[in-house]
Image (cartoon, grey):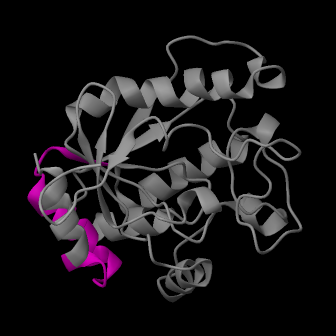
Amino acid sequence: MLSADDARRAAASLRGAPADAVLAWAVATFPGRVALSLSFGGPGVVLAHMLSAIDRTVPVLFIDTGMLFPETLSFKDAFVARYGLNVVTLRPASDPGPLYTTAPDACCGIRKVEPMQRVLPLYAAWVSALRRDQSSARSETDVIEYHGGGDRPVIKVHPLAYWSRSDVWRYMSENQIPHHPLLDQGYSSLGCWPCTRPSADASDERAGRWAGTAKTECGLHTFTTRVRARPGGETT
């Protein structure tokens, strides 16, 4: 396991590297202990495409909340078959019913956060498609981060951290990567169907998530806490 200071040095060395090089670093540094989380609801499939060329045995963690669009499940199956991914499907331990109408944070906690918390101790590194330009909450995302919280620390890897939305779509076009069909119908980010709407705000990729509320994150990427290392090795 890397220390917080090791993670800081790795981030500094990889910050300007191509995204596939960052992903390859994670696979090589944590053999058998790295996983990619993917919703198949947005352009994060870029990382799945890269992973298919690096190591198809790496687990791709897919959380089936029980509330996903049928189109998401169909797209996921077709994409996995096309690229030969090793998908591990996670599901909530219980069904809270329509809790999203009264307590959306608790609903996300049961349907998304708990399944990831349950499996995360199996891995030393967690790769995801977070980008700095997606929202203000993600504006300080770095390529390599040391996170505490949960049962033990984990290295979070964000190969697309410094990409823009146009970078993502350019890569998908150049590599002929298929995308979720609802992205052509006004949606810019896909989650559970009760809490996702089309959005006319082209500047905000996540504008259609939990529309009309102050909620911007499901909790999946906030239940761990980033630990920042100072040059002298101290942490904050």
Q: Is residue 163 above or below residue 122?
A: below
- Image check: 1 left or right of 44? left
The quarter of the image holding the N terminus is top left
Front residue of 81/189: it is: 189
Q: Is residue 214 above or below residue 16?
A: above
Q: Estimate the x, y position of residue 121 in percent, counting from the top left.
A: 24, 29
Front residue of 227/190: it is: 227
- Quadrant of residue 28 in the image? bottom left
- Image check: 184 left or right of 39? right
Front residue of 122/48: it is: 122
Q: In this view, does 71 lie above or below 149?
A: below
Q: Can residue 154 be seen in this view?
A: yes
- Quadrant of residue 109 in the image? top right
Q: What stretch is highlighted in magenta?
A: 13-35
* Residue at x 73% of width, y 41% of height: 215
Taking the magenta stretch, the answer to whether it contains residue 21 is yes
* Residue at x 57% of width, y 20% of height: 110
Q: Is residue 135 above or below residue 30?
A: below
* Residue at x 46% of width, y 40% of height: 62
- Image check: 90 left or right of 68? left
Taking the magenta stretch, the answer to whether it contains residue 234 is no
Q: Estimate the x, y position of residue 105 in percent, counting from the top left.
A: 67, 28
Q: Estimate the x, y position of residue 76 in percent, counting from the top left.
A: 54, 50
Count how many numbered circles sit on residues in the image.
Answer: 0
